[in-house]
Amino acid sequence: MENIKKLTSKRLFMPLFCLAVMLIAAVIASPDFFKIGIQNGVLYGRIIDVINRGSEVVILAVGMTLVVSASAGTDISVGAVMAVVAAVACAFTAGGQQSVNEYIRNPLLGALLAILVGILCGCFNGFLVAKLKIQPMVATLILFTAGRGIAQLLTNGQITYVRVDSYKMLGSSIPGVPVPTSIFVTVLMVVLTMLLLKKTAMGMYIEAVGINSKAARLVGLKSTMIIFLVYAFSGFCASIAGLINSSRIYSADANNIGLNLELDAILAVALGGNSLAGGKFSLLGSVIGAYTIQTLTTTLYAGSVSSDQIPVYKAIVVVIIVSLQSPELGKLMRRLKAKFSAGAGKGAVS
Amino acid sequence: MNKKMVSLLTVSAMAISMMPLSVFAEEDLITVGYAQVGAESDWRTANTESFKSTFTEENGYKLIFDDAQQKQENQIKAIRSFIQQEVDYIVVAPVVETGWETVLQEAADAGIPVILSDRMMDLADDSLYTCWVGGNFTLEGETCGDWLAAYLEEQGRGEEEINIVTIQGTIGASAQIGRTEGFAKKLAEHENWKMLDMQSGEFTQAKGQEVMESFLKSYDDIDVVICENDNEAFGAIDAIKAAGKTCGPDGDIIVVSFDAVKAAFDSMIAGDLNATFECNPLHGPRVAEIIQKLEAGEEVEKIQYVDEAFFDTTMDLEAIQAERAY
């Protein structure tokens, strides 16, 4: 009993519990959910789809978690930044043409340039939020609106295709490697970020700034710098996610790449048990939250739910998960339990 | 950025750019104002081009073109400025369906006929516009069904049990509704056709791929995939290949899609896509025809569909692609 209590009081218990429930629901919807096979030399199965397709949201959620923690705000520009990054990568490698079958310019240089542009977008957000003290939602709204326009300009308003096999590798797989590339990238991003936060005191700094930026400044932390950095980092995450997404469709579709993914990333942070008011955070929680969302999506496909009803199911699940994690609901439950056991005790006496 | 400032600048830029037109407009030219949605896709660009190449001075027209950048308020402003400039006809491709009564009433009061292009308006009083010109999505769906029946017959599979899945467009979009309905009509005519599943791919390649991945795991023997736009088909084809199956005329799975964009021709030439059903953007000539009829004092039909074709791998696709403007 004591052990169970210890377990349930763990920070990650609730997010993990929700993911587990989702996975059980997934197995009920499609019994072969966990079946993994090999197809064309690559792992193949629904669970692989979840991990593979979830990559973008996981990576975005990593950046978003830090943004939320340090600035008590959200970066709603990440989806549009993904589109910008994809546009830079494709427009550069395709040399401005609409569709190419071989690289016109060096793809690695294109990827680097794209990542750089993504980071610059993040820096722009960071400058507005940290330096000019504009509310995060408003500051990032600028790129949210303008980003897709910039991407359209870069690609001349057309979908730019780079039909080269090596361009597709990031979003699919490298020949001879059975694991989809995006899974590697995601693991790398998560592990590196965690190391960065744990090995340097960065994680603690971010939390400190998020809890009270004034106090953090008074004890000698450069709050402004830290907030600026988390936005730049979020831009970096968005650029990696954008490259993966662009590689999946070997093109830059300015209107659709990363569309609404900022909302999924924010949701992932919330489902991970993190408070959107900033402060203490759990990166793993957000990662679990992101996979929970993807499991839900894949399960709904597998369960043949008709497409116009999918949003309803998603909403119901999100409401349930979020309220399960609400401390107020927990208090209410405890109060009810206390009342009940008090009542039962009285009954036994008389 | 200051929105008011931007719109002010746009309006004044518009006013300046239009001034010479109204000053020097020749008497015998028919002035047509076109309020276009924007330039968000190849289709839209081709649509604009079709108007610009039809309504030329050589043909006896003066075209005043306005790009609304996807905003209704810009379109309303454009229509008002058309009225002020006393154009002869107004053509609108409405961004949204509702909220047009006031401005259309103003046009009606000024005695200017309004022709709708591509999208419909939701009006209490249909007499506010003269007619509507656009594609018939339901017919596209039916054509797809007919094509499939003929194709299967040709393959000697006319009586076989055929398993079909559909990757739908964004739910609620008129293209999605029409294409789904049109194909459903034909589906009902064939007892051996079985619709296994329908999911939305939101008109994008990435979602099309994701949905197809799931379909392939749920059903072992899919014979036909219907994608409600070309981009979804590109994603579906990638998913089919990743699952170790083949598609196209020589493959296990028949893939068909709608729109007939340029890349769809590439895909058919590569032998991945079986057929695509056109959504014709070239509305200009049909609108010109209507205007000529109105000029002659004739009645015109309220709903007018543009002609739409389909393309499959039996055709000389390279030649067709070279000729097409989009």
Image: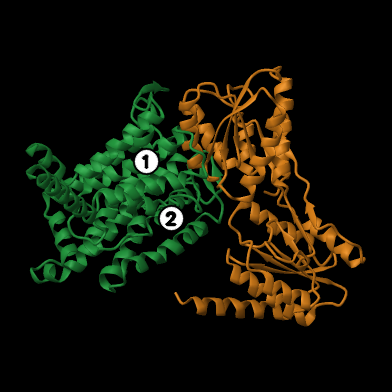
Left or right: where does residue B206 sit relative to residue B253? left
Residue that badge 1 annotates:
A294
Task: Name the chain under label 1.
Answer: A
Chain A colour as displayed? green
Query: Callout 2: 10 Å neighbours few (<14), some, many (20+)?
Result: many
Left or right: where does residue B133 sit relative to residue B291? left
**Nearer the observer, A202 or A110:** A202
Q: CA distance from mark 1 to mark 2?
A: 24 Å
Task: Name the chain under label 2.
Answer: A
> In which quadrant of the rendered view does residue B143 lie?
top right
Q: How is the image coloured?
A: by chain
Q: Amino acid at mark 2?
A: Val
* Vertical order, B40 against A350 (above or below): below
Is residue A150 visible from the viewing direction of this image? Answer: yes
Q: Earlier in the sequence, mark 1 or mark 2?
A: 2
The reply to whether the C-beta atoms of the residues labelled 1 and 2 are less than 8 Å apart is no
Q: Residue at x 51, y 53 (%)?
A: A255
Q: Residue furthest bottom?
A: B23
> In which quadrant of the rendered view does residue A50 lie?
top left
Locate residue B186, reporting x and y percent.
71, 33
* Vertical order, A217 against A232 (above or below): below
Residue that badge 2 annotates:
A84
Q: Nearer the viewer, mark 1 or mark 2?
A: 1
Chain B colour as displayed? orange
Q: Amino acid at mark 1?
A: Gln
